[in-house]
Amino acid sequence: MWFDTPRLLQSYQARQIAQARQKLSSEDQLNAGKIVAELSFGFWSALVARRYSASLVPVLLRECFRDIPASSRRQVYLSATLNALRMFRNRVFHHEPIWYLSDLADKFNTIMQLVIWLSPELYRVVYPITNFHDVYSQGTLPFKRNVLDASN
């Protein structure tokens, strides 16, 4: 339960931990994995913010992002990357059309890069079953038609 370390987390993240615990049964509150699963992407992206540069970022780089290359092994880069993906994820999960974005392929590549940094094993499982490139190569017209048909 690393997140229970006194004064490790700032008040916002500590409140998120408390809220996660409230959602769980009393038995599950004792399970770090269950608590971690309740936390939002915003919680995790905040842990690489500048305010955690001296405390958490070095640990995260060493323990979670072991395969990150030296050229990207900077708090500023990792924070900007995770926050950009968090904002993109929020758009997708709030059903905002994203087909107009000119950098979708870049966003996909960034997501896959983060997967590699977090777990090369997971990347080897996930990448072969993604169909992003097939779907993306078809362009936006099939999806715009589906949206228009659904609204009529």
Image (cartoon, grey):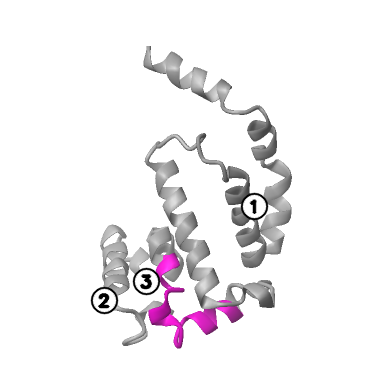
* Amino acid type at mark 3: Leu
Q: Quadrant of residue 117?
A: bottom right
In depth, the one of 57 and 140 nearer the eye is 140
CA gap between label 3 and label 1 equals: 37 Å
Is residue 97 found inside the magenta-colored segment of the image?
A: no
Chain part drawn in magenta: 44-62
Give me the disc on residue 109: 1
What's under tag 2, amino acid-wise? Ser
For mark 1, does the 10 Å Cα neighbourhood hold few (<14), some (14 to 19), or many (20 or more) residues? Answer: few
Residue drawn 45% across the image and 21% down it: 147
Residue 106 percent coordinates (x, y): 61, 50
Q: Residue at x 64, y 34 (%)?
A: 136
Q: Report helix, strand or loop for mark 2.
A: helix
Asked if residue 47 lies in the magenta stretch, the reply is: yes
For the residue labelled by badge 3, is the local secondary structure a helix, a strand or a loop?
A: helix
- Above-or-below relation of 83 to 11: above
